[in-house]
Amino acid sequence: MRDFAGAPGTLTGLALRLSQCVFAAGSIAAMTTTTNFFNSTSFCYLIASMGLQIIWSFGLTLLDAYALVRKKTLHNTVLLSLFVVGDWVTAILSLAAASASAGIAVLYFHDLGSCSFVRECQKYQMSVALAFFSWITTAISSLIMLWLFAAG
């Protein structure tokens, strides 16, 4: 297997994992600073999904950092299969949560005429945007892992 951008144990792989954590944490922070997020199931699902994303990505960030410090490769077939499954599961959950929350945010902000709590609607939109950014970086990682696994 070749080392290429985004592979586990590389600097770009570490950057992808770290950006997943930062975007997911930002999404949670933006959502939890509102007062009424718990009234919508999709917003609660977004927080749960982004929490799982943080746990998964932070663990792999630490693993990538360890591999970089020790100059080890993480191209073991069993390890890559775990990365593939974990990345695809978190990517699908993140996309579902971000899409559901985006639907509710659009409903609140546009479809109901006007948002009576404008500051909260803006925070909802920011949280959803950060969740989509987290999903994009997770999708990139999952495609790279699948490519490595298929090439292995």
Image (tube, helix red, strand yellow):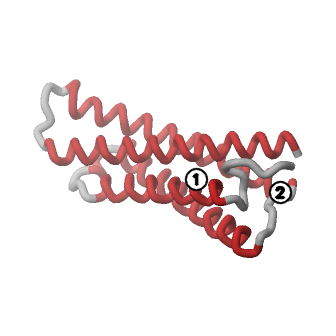
Query: Is residue 64 left or right of 106 when viewed as pictured?
Result: right
Q: Quadrant of residue 105?
A: top left
**Three-letter code, disc 1:** Leu
Q: Point out residue 44 in the picture as x, y percentages from the top left corner.
A: 39, 50
Question: Whole-Å distance between the Cαs marked 2 and 1?
Answer: 17 Å
Residue at the spot 65% in from the left edge and 69% down from the top edge: 65
Q: Residue 16, which numbered label?
A: 1
Residue at 44% over, 35% down? 99
Q: Is residue 91 above or below residue 38?
A: above
Question: Going 80% across and 45% down the picture, which residue do you hit?
Answer: 148
Q: Quadrant of residue 117?
A: top left
Relative image position of residue 84 (x, y in whole percent): 73, 47
How busy is the neighbourhood of tag 2: few (under 14 within 10 Å), some, or many (20 plus)?
A: some
Regarding mark 2 in the picture, which secondary structure is present there? loop
Residue at point 50%, 58% (across, down): 21
Q: Which mark is residue 75?
A: 2
Vertically, is 44 above or below 64?
Answer: above
Q: Pick the residue in front: 147 or 121.
A: 147
Q: Secondary structure at mark 1?
A: helix
Q: Quadrant of residue 53?
A: bottom right
Please state if 41 lies on the left or on the right of 68 as rendered: left
Q: Position of residue 27 (x, y in %)?
A: 38, 52
Amino acid identity at mark 2: His
Residue 108 appears left or right of 1? left
